[in-house]
Amino acid sequence: MQENLVALQSILTKEVTRYFRIWIQTLLPPAITMSLYFVIFGNLIGEKIGQMDDKPYIAYITPGIIMMSVITNSYSNVVSSFFSAKFQRHIEELLVSPVPNIYILLGYIGGGVSRGLLTGAIVTGISLFFVDLEIHNWFVVFVVILLTSTLFALGGFINAVFAKKFDDISIVPTFILTPLTYLGGVFYTISLLPEFWQKVSMANPILYMVNAFRYGFLGRSDIALEVAFTIIGIFIVALFSFALYLLNTGKGLKS
């Protein structure tokens, strides 16, 4: 048990050290990108829109912008790190070691979660220059951001397992993650949509995360909080089980 915990700590330390070592590529870009969102969508467009769901528009979209950075960075950290380990073939040394696969998985997830949380904190700090943040429920804010970063770290891990070349690790973020994020209620309330498109939006898992996170800040949500937590929990259990299955069977990892 003690040896396994040491292995877990070693993997986690390696992952954290990795993104800190290249912080210009990992931590600086989301800070700049999200600052542009605040300037363009918050200050410029927000003044024209006025209020959304009885809140100033910039205050309404702030939780969604923070969540965007958490999703993107927790996902990209794991997918790039694990695929690099697989591509350079040093993941094989880890797989043949006596370390149980669940600890390997937890180590990589922990690295993705830590980067997601750190990026979220950076973007939250930046948001204070544009809006006076109010926190309706600290517990909900923390739990949602932790669960969301865990979920997308798992997604990044699975993407890395199936990726055959470096181009493959950008397919999911470009063609799936980005559209789902923009259509996940970051910049609007789904109550503005026609009834048909409201029902279609309910199939988007990111909608539940963004709204639960927004509830933590503003006390506003298009989705019942219990439903949001249930959906997020189901996805985490499903992806964790699948990722562990891939490690145990060696699918996508063995030549």
Image (tube, rainbow, N blue to C red):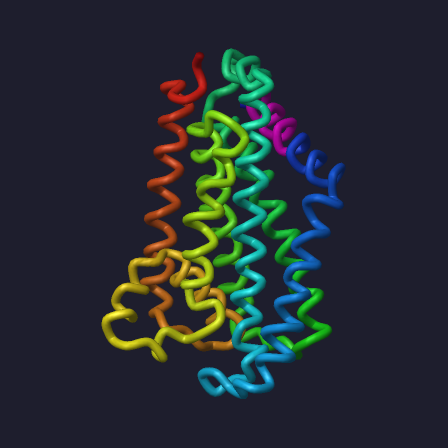
Q: Residue at x 44, y 77 (%)?
A: 220
Per the rendered image, the range of residues in magenta is 2-12
Residue 14 picture location, percent across and down? 67, 30
Residue 81 picture location, percent across and down? 59, 32
Q: Residue at x 50, y 69 (%)?
A: 216
Q: Nearer the viewer, residue 253 or 137?
A: 253
Q: Main secondary structure of the magenta part?
A: helix
The quadrant of the picture occupied by the C terminus is top left
Left or right side of 242 for 219: right
Left or right side of 192 for 127: right
Residue 170 magenta? no
Q: How many marks?
A: 0
Residue 37's place in the image compared with 30, above or below, is: below
Residue 135's place in the image compared with 253, above or below, is: below
Residue 9 magenta? yes
Residue 7 picture location, percent across and down? 60, 24
Q: Residue at x 39, y 62 (%)?
A: 208
Residue 117's place in the image compared with 156, above or below, is: below
Kindly indicate the quadrant of the structure image that contains residue 135.
bottom right
Residue 37 picture location, percent across and down? 62, 67
Q: Residue at x 63, y 73 (%)?
A: 40
